[in-house]
Amino acid sequence: MYQALYRKYRSQTFDEMVGQTVISTTLKQAVASGKISHAYLFSGPRGTGKTSAAKIFAKAMNCPNQVDGEPCNHCDICRDITNGSLEDVIEIDAASNNGVDEIREIRDKSTYAPSRATYKVYIIDEVHMLSTGAFNALLKTLEEPTENVVFILATTELHKIPATILSRVQRFEFKAIKLAAIQDHLARILDKEGIAYDQEALTLIARRAEGGMRDALSILDQALSLSSDNYVSLETAEEITGSISLGALDDYLANVISHETTAALTNLETIFDSGKSMSRFATDLLLYLRDLLIVQTGGENTHTSQTFEDNLSLDQNLIFRMIDQVTASLAEIKNASQPKIYAEMMTIQLSEIQAPVESGNLPENLSSELDDLRQEIKQLQEQIKNLSSGPVSASKPTAQRKTGFTFKVDRVKILTIMEETVVDSQRSREYLDALKGAWNEILDSISPQDRALLLGSEPVLANSENAILAFDAAFNAEQAMKRSDLNDMFGNIMSKAAGFSPNILAVPRKDFNSIRTEFAQKLNAQKQESKTEENDETFIPEGFGFLASKIEKIND
């Protein structure tokens, strides 16, 4: 029976692990020195070696012939662990065994001593799938560990692990494997298999794997299945991954740059007719533009076509504007029922983008025309101010439609939090300082997508239950409030980093400043009122307070 490449070439020693040097070195030293903890947590993207590292670690700590922390892979224990037949090393899939009863059974059986190995090892994969009750049962086991029992937890979603679990394990964060490392590993495997290949094909496969070695090997397996002559070509890799050929992107972008809209639309039609996804096309176009920027700044050039070399002469500001346009269109293409229409709209918009003109190169007559336009705009602004108190014009609804959306801010809740912070200002300042101090750690601990969502925001107010984040962009604030999982992730990180777990309340910065001004005015008014009442009270002689309602104060 044929064995898949990712199984056939699965790492069997720490030295064979790709792209995780720090983790493999640390685990080797732990085995060599005998400093083995009772619980570990391996987190990171899929296909980066978490389960493989767990099995290697289990072999190393139980191998009677280990040398410098590496298992021998020849003894009975090593072979049985590799085959999955050693009863002292138990692999559990938490996705299908996520109940309290299963974890209680593990807890009860963990009290028995290992039969053949030195350590009894439980490898729990996708541990974030455990229910709340199962996590509580597991927590009890981790609090009072049995001697010679080691738990290795693996997860792709660290933010779903309770803070109580995180504080009782040694954490190892597996990173996405770099493109060059994946490419070199694929080349070594093909050389060992005696299969020829295009270097560009391996680059494309490594890029599509997005940092996961298992995904790269699976794509390579598909490419080998499609190849009938034991040769992995670029065309085969493009067919398997659904990628757009670099030649098609070269021609498309060249036509867009030269404002030949009809020719660019013809390129798009050809790409669509070949069965390519429009969202994949937009993504590949983004990567192509990114490659232009990287090469312009001195990075490695993986493209070999002359058209790409010609496109390198593009102005960087124009490339940035094109990237902004493609990024904005990508969301519409992905969510549209007719993605081709939005791809065509994107093509037209790209071809209409003009390169920025430097102010020093402006014609003389254009400069004077600009001055005239500025003067006219100033006059129009004055007229609008004069009309602001008059009746609403018929064109006003059209102007409102252009704003896109309105984000409704919970003003009452924000004002309530502000009142609470005034009552206990010192404690509120401590919460806010703790939140600001942990802000960079929070951004480093979340995914790039979530980090992009929180960029341009900052903590501005906090108490024990709430954290107000002010966003520069109202759209980001709206999206943050729509994310149901953001509060759990944020709370877990804050609980560990700052000792409290607040709920997020996102608000556009402009609205927050407005509410803060309103609150300050209200607070000043209350102070003035209380001061006036105090003066009125001091006006009444001592002992005549009962006449307060009858006395009227008249100022000279």
Image: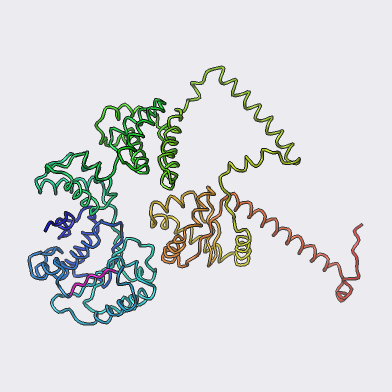
Q: Is residue 348 magenta?
A: no
Count of numbered marks: 0
Q: Is residue 90 magenta?
A: yes
Q: Residue furthest front?
A: 273
Q: Main secondary structure of the magenta part?
A: strand
> Can you say which quadrant of the picture contains the C terminus?
bottom right
Q: Relative to 362, say whether 153 is above or below.
A: below
Q: Quadrant of residue 214?
A: bottom left
- The structure residue drawn at horizontal position 46% and vertical position 52%, both measured from the top left corner, is 454
- Between 172 and 244, the one nearer to me in the picture: 244
Q: Is residue 482 left or right of residue 258?
A: right
Q: Is residue 356 left or right of residue 415?
A: left
- Between 154 and 13, the one nearer to me in the picture: 154
- Between 283 and 119, the one nearer to me in the picture: 283
Magenta region: 88-93
Q: Position of residue 474 (x, y in %)?
A: 54, 49
Q: Relative to 78, say whether 223 is above or below.
A: above
- The structure residue drawn at horizontal position 63% and vertical position 55%, both measured from the top left corner, is 516
> Can you say which quadrant of the picture contains the N terminus?
bottom left
Q: Position of residue 109 (x, y in %)?
A: 24, 81
- The structure residue drawn at horizontal position 18% and vertical position 67%, both measured from the top left corner, is 31
- Between 152 and 550, the one nearer to me in the picture: 152
